[in-house]
Image: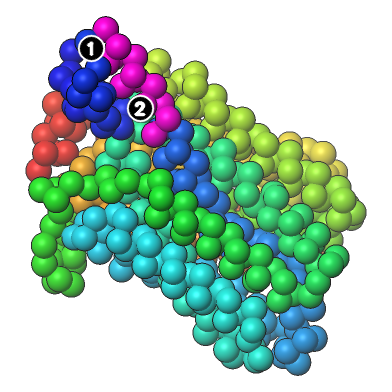
Amino acid sequence: MPESGQSTPGHIRTAPPASAPPAVAAPAAAAAARRVGLLVTLVLGGLTALPPLSMDMYLPALPEVTGSLHAPAATIQLTLTACLAGMALGQLVVGPMSDKWGRRRPLLIGMVVYVAATAVCALAPSAELLIAFRLLQGLAGAAGIVIARAVVRDLYDGDDMARFFSTLMLISGTAPIVAPLIGGQILRVTDWRGVFYVLTVIGLLLTAVVWKWLPETLPQERRHGGGVGAALRTMRGLLADRVFTGYTLAGSLAFAALFAYISASPFVVQEIYGASPQTFSLLFGINSIGLVAVGRINGKVLVGRVSLDKVLGVGLATITVAALALLLMTAGVFGKVGLVPVAAGLFVLMSAMGLALPNTNTQALTRTPHAAGSASALLGTSSFLIGAIASPLVGIAGETTAVPMAVVQLVCALGAVACFAGLCRPWRRTDSEDRQSART
């Protein structure tokens, strides 16, 4: 039985009131832990949802922005690229900062800068200024992504961490569905600048919530001193861990297969298979529900009963089989197939992400309690950069075939399996080896 003020695995540290009798102290501490845990879940969920909201709420407004700022469509597309690049690179800066100064200070600074940059985007008089501040918005918004993962690593371990990541998967899977709908409704009552005003308000609310309810989760004795050189040495040490690198690359390549789907699916479903925008929205929503549902099953049913590596292996294998089936269908090996079989293949691929993504994050971060911020930065940056490289390749053959999408997904899936099998080697590792790695 832990003493008062200590934490059991997977629970946030709480202490019962000093005057409480022993019979009351334990239930009071449990109730306090549940309350704090719920608040932290809501805060981290909001931080996790902010990047897809920042990206996808803006999508319905792109044609209007092109006309309003008198800029070519290709130039306005750079506003998306700039935000994505900022989110990728910003994590490399914020992650080590959070290991040195704690989680709250870098997160609050990032949120304040995010709010300011988003407000300037709403007022931008030119495409060039909009691109510049979308980059800054992405750089600052990266604080929420990287620190949310680091906080989870501070508070949870093992199966509890896997469950929490599955919960965050529910939010990150739902946000891309809701965001374009919100953006479309905003455009019914105002112009594209209104989207950024709404994002500014969301940023302000999140900043206030973080200030009031998110505690500092990295104690002083676990922080790391040093500047840029120390941060680079820490990251080099993390990358030297073959198993950590394996989980990072496996998760990033699986995420790239997801990016390929997001980039190509509007074109594939509507242009190649002739579906209506409403049908595409329905299929996109169903696929996202599949991802969320399987993530929920992972967190509530599988974690604690089945080895995380076994679940991860099944997830990666399922993604690979689904990608292969999509390639065979789109290449005409089975003759001409309609939308329904292709949509079924995409549904299986997307749903299996609910097994792969939470568990790669968990297994990678389990090995790095000493530098969770830097580890989270490497996880996030790797995912965004590999995803950004994969996304443009889906349209390389023009607008008449879905083969490039399936090829990219299959290559990414095979790469993820190769990294998992070749670098992580779960069948060769013992629990004691993993614990020793976590201490070093």
Q: Position of residue 75 (x, y in %)?
A: 65, 86
Magenta span of residues: 23-36
Q: Quadrant of the N terminus?
A: top left
Q: Check residue 21 in the rendering and tell me which mark sits there, or answer none.
A: 1
Instruction: Identify which amino acid the numbered label 1 is placed on.
Output: Pro
Along the line of sight, the residue nearer the viewer: 356 or 374: 374
Mark 2: which secondary structure? helix
Question: Residue at (17%, 18%) from the top-left corner?
Answer: 2
What percent of the width, then of the height, locates residue 272?
Answer: 83, 58
Mark found first going from the N terminus, 1 or 2: 1
Would you identify the image quadrant in which residue 434 lies?
Answer: top left
At mark 1, the secondary structure is loop
Q: Residue at x 27, y 45 (%)?
A: 217
Q: Residues within 10 Å of mark 2 (few under 14, many from 20)?
A: some
Q: Which residue is mark 2?
A: 33
Outermost residue, top direction? 23
